[in-house]
Image (spheres, grey):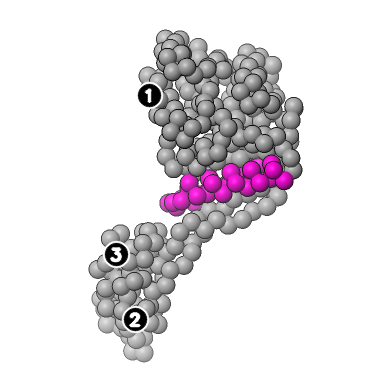
């Protein structure tokens, strides 16, 4: 089983469009599994029209909880909290029979550092796992899809990416599927590192913009560091031929093969509105360019 990860040095380069097209083309020749590793803004499902089969909670860290029955309102928790997550009780005296008014934790502000937990003299604080998102197993017309949704203001997206990719890999091994296609997150941070781990090949999607070469350098530094061989695909290549030539020259100097030169065409947007990969929607120049990308990938993965 081979793993292909599709990456870009920044968002908005057309990475998911390419991933959906490759899913369509690859599924016509061999059994595949798909994983959308962009858990902060997953959108591969918009093009693949999946049917959800499983849904699971993802716990991504802890949050402090103060037991009002045990709290003595000493204020130590507020003193040690660096994130101003501890909410002080009302300064008004408690009503008759109400007892001591307790401190509380703002779960949005709490970073789960547990400083208050260790400093509370009466052990009135406990740490609880919090649900940071959900991950899903879905069926698509091209193969199983594993994807996820990280809740707003939550961390550990790298951990969730690892989980999604691991589930896809296990499904591919269990069912003898030959290829795992991972639609990776943009940028070069922890989620990208998690998506790239163990990949046999990375396809780097870049646009011919002013920052195109810089963005490509960033993501290449990441894949090179982790020993993942890379190919390059230039999207909207005809929008700025000068910048496209600059990217090609950079790749030639680095010995990196450019396997795709995709022209700009509004048919891509039309296909997305229809919820279909562009290769399943048209046989025009864009689809032909994406078929050439797939042929190049097959050669490098020996599929």
Gap in Å between the C-alphas at discs 3 and 1? 40 Å
Q: Which residue is mark 1?
A: 214
Magenta: main secondary structure: helix
Residue 24 position in % (x across, y down): 69, 28
From what the image shows, is residue 289 above or below residue 97? above
Specify which label sits upstream in the sequence, 3 or 2: 3
Side of 113 relative to 272 (left or right): left
Residue in the foreground of this view, choosing between 56 and 172: 172
User: Which numbered disc, 3 or 1, marks the residue closer to the eye?
Assistant: 1
The segment highlighted magenta reads 145-174
Image quadrant containing the C terminus: top right
Q: Residues within 10 Å of mark 3 (few under 14, many from 20)?
A: some
Q: Is residue 165 magenta?
A: yes
Q: Does dot 3 land on a helix, a strand or a loop?
A: loop
What residue is at 51 percent from the left and 21 percent from the top?
A: 232
Gap in Å between the C-alphas at discs 3 and 2? 17 Å
Q: Residues within 10 Å of mark 2 (few under 14, many from 20)?
A: few
Gap in Å between the C-alphas at discs 2 and 1? 54 Å
Q: Is residue 149 magenta?
A: yes
Residue 186 position in % (x across, y down): 47, 34
Specify which label sits upstream in the sequence, 2 or 1: 2
Q: Which residue is mark 2?
A: 122
Asked whether residue 247 appears in the rendered view, the answer is: no
């Amino acid at each position: 089983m081979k793993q292909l990860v599709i990456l870009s040095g920044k968002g908005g380069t057309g990475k998911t469009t390419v991933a959906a097209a490759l899913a369509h083309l690859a599924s016509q020749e061999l059994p595949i599994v798909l994983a959308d590793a962009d858990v902060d803004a997953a959108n591969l499902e918009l093009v693949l029209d999946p049917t959800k089969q499983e849904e699971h909670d993802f716990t991504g860290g802890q949050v402090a909880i103060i037991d009002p029955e045990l709290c003595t309102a000493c204020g130590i928790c507020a003193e040690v909290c660096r994130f101003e997550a501890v909410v002080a009780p009302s300064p008004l005296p408690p009503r008759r029979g109400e007892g001591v008014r307790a401190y509380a934790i703002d779960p949005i502000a709490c970073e789960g550092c547990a400083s208050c937990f260790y400093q509370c003299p009466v052990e009135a604080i406990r740490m609880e796992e919090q649900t940071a998102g959900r991950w899903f197993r879905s069926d698509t017309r091209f193969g199983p899809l594993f994807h996820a949704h990280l809740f707003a203001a939550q961390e550990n997206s790298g951990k969730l990416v690892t989980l999604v990719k691991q589930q896809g890999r296990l499904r591919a091994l269990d069912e003898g599927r030959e290829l795992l296609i991972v639609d990776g997150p943009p940028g070069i941070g922890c989620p990208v590192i998690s998506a790239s781990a163990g990949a046999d090949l990375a396809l780097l999607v870049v646009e011919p913009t002013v920052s195109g070469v810089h963005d490509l350098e960033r993501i290449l530094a990441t894949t090179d560091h982790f020993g993942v061989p890379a190919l390059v695909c230039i999207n909207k290549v005809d929008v700025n031929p000068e910048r496209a030539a600059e990217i090609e020259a950079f790749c030639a100097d680095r010995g990196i093969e450019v396997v795709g030169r995709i022209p700009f065409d509004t048919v891509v947007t039309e296909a997305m509105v229809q919820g279909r990969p562009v290769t399943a929607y048209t046989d025009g120049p864009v689809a032909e360019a994406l078929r050439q990308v797939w042929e190049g990938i097959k050669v490098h993965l020996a599929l």
